[in-house]
Image (cartoon, rainbow, N blue to C red):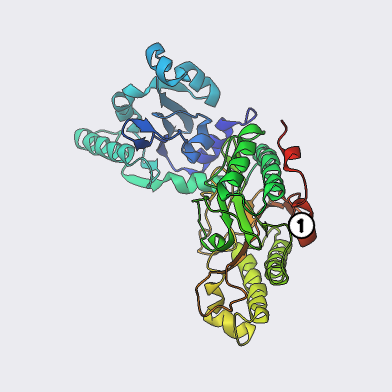
Amino acid sequence: MQNTDFKARREKVFNMMEDGIAILGSAKFVTRSNDTEYPFRQNSNFKYLTGINEPDSILVMTQKGGENKTYIFIRKNDAFEEMWAGKRLGLEKAQDLMDADQAFDIKDFEKEIPHLLLGHRNLYMHFHERRDIFDLAQRISGDLFNKKRKSTELPPSEIKNLGAIVERLRYTKDANEILTMKKAMIATDKAHRAAMAFTRPGRNEKEVAALIQFIFEKGDSQGNAYDNIVAGGNNANILHYIENNQELKDGDLFLIDAGSQLNYYATDITRTFPVNGKFTDVQKDVYEIVLESQKTAISHAWPGRTAPELHQSVCNVLTQGLIDLGALKGSVEENLEKGTFRKFFPHGTGHWLGLDVHDQNPYMDGTGNPMKFEPGVIFTVEPGLYFPKGDGEIPSHLQGIGIRIEDNILITDKGHENLSSMIPKEVKEVEEACEKDYITFLDL
């Protein structure tokens, strides 16, 4: 995101601080096995405030006497290390990239941080990440207090949650962030269409998963935003099924929950379609209920509304549908009150979306009420119905059916925009998409 003003983002953080120093660490490499590591994935809050995509880095922001300062601690350039592990940003480029006041070698953090801590009332840190930095800052502050207790400049006496500040800022996306997510959606659209066209009885889930991953890696995206769910038949009733290795069978449905990412900004889309390209009558009945509930929820997406309101609208439609299918007995009101619908719809209707696929934004405001939608908020709407095989309480004609339909919704000044509206989801559209030639989506 070349046009991102990281300094402006940090100024917003400063505006929400009270006479303090903020310390935020980057992510670390995570061991896969022995001496090998998983691909590096930056801490989203760190990325949001710095734009830096390297490990072993620490952001320090100080606010004193009306003056705001930003410091970055990062690895120095090292020709030998870079020969093995790739180019480093280095101090000068890091300072320029994020428009910091000064850059230090990460090895000097313990030497420099004591004097930066002095003279601040509050220490802002993330409570649940980089415990090593959290503990170090606390220890140094305690040592400084014992040494400086008679001084006019003392270390912070109160610790506050930096994560809550940054994540509130991330709740709404700016024009650049929205454009990035729209660009990521291009590959997601191609992948879902290609999967519909490629699928047929006898193929394996892993073949379809590989096709999706190929498109995510080849297109204008940067791989998958999360572990894709590629679930044929009864596997769709495992909400986070990621084995993706079973044969696809004639007459089954196929649930694919897959989204690409660009500059860490995620898309998150689910489509369900027939393996053989044609819905059976009962599959169509269930599908239309889920689709109606999703459309109803999306129609309520506008500024001032809340996620629980959308969820309730979904529950109303699904509960009536479950009664119509014979899966529930009694009235809608009675089943809603008892929560019996949760057996078939056990999850929420959606979640925030952004730098994380489950974006770290607040769901409740400062008064304990649900956050209201604002222009720039992006979230998923993903109702589903699940009827696992082998449950004697479920009518036999429904067993083995698992359906979820998920879109990504942007709140606008006048309502909403469905960022994934181009991906087929009407029954006729889906069946037509299953008849296409998947090669046309590969850009070979």
What residue is rendered at 65% in x and 75% in y?
Answer: 316
Q: Is residue 59 above or below residue 336?
A: above
319 with respect to 421 (left or right):
left
Quarter of the view holding residue 131: top left
Q: Position of residue 416 (x, y in %)?
A: 73, 54
Give the residue type at disc 1: Glu
Viewer-proximal residue among 274 and 241: 274
392 with respect to 349 (left or right):
left
323 with respect to 113 (left or right):
right
Viewer-proximal residue among 209 and 303: 209
Q: Is residue 76 above or below residue 9?
A: above
What residue is rendered at 46% in x and 20% in y?
Answer: 86
Q: Which residue is mark 1?
A: 431
Q: Position of residue 315 (x, y in %)?
A: 62, 72
242 with respect to 60 (left or right):
right
Q: Is residue 75 above or below residue 168?
A: above
What residue is rendered at 64% in x and 73% in y?
Answer: 318
Which residue is at the far bottom?
330
Viewer-proximal residue among 63 and 40: 40
Q: Position of residue 326 (x, y in %)?
A: 63, 82
Q: Is residue 83 visible?
A: yes
What residue is rendered at 50% in x and 73% in y?
Answer: 390
Q: Position of residue 99 (x, y in %)?
A: 54, 24
Quarter of the view holding residue 309: bottom right
Q: Is residue 351 visible?
A: no
Q: Is residue 222 above or below residue 327?
A: above
| Mark 1 nearby-residue class (10 Å; few <14, some 14–19, many ≥20) | many
Which residue is at the far left?
146
Q: Secondary structure at mark 1?
A: helix
Position of the N terminus by quadrant: top right
Position of the C terminus by quadrant: top right
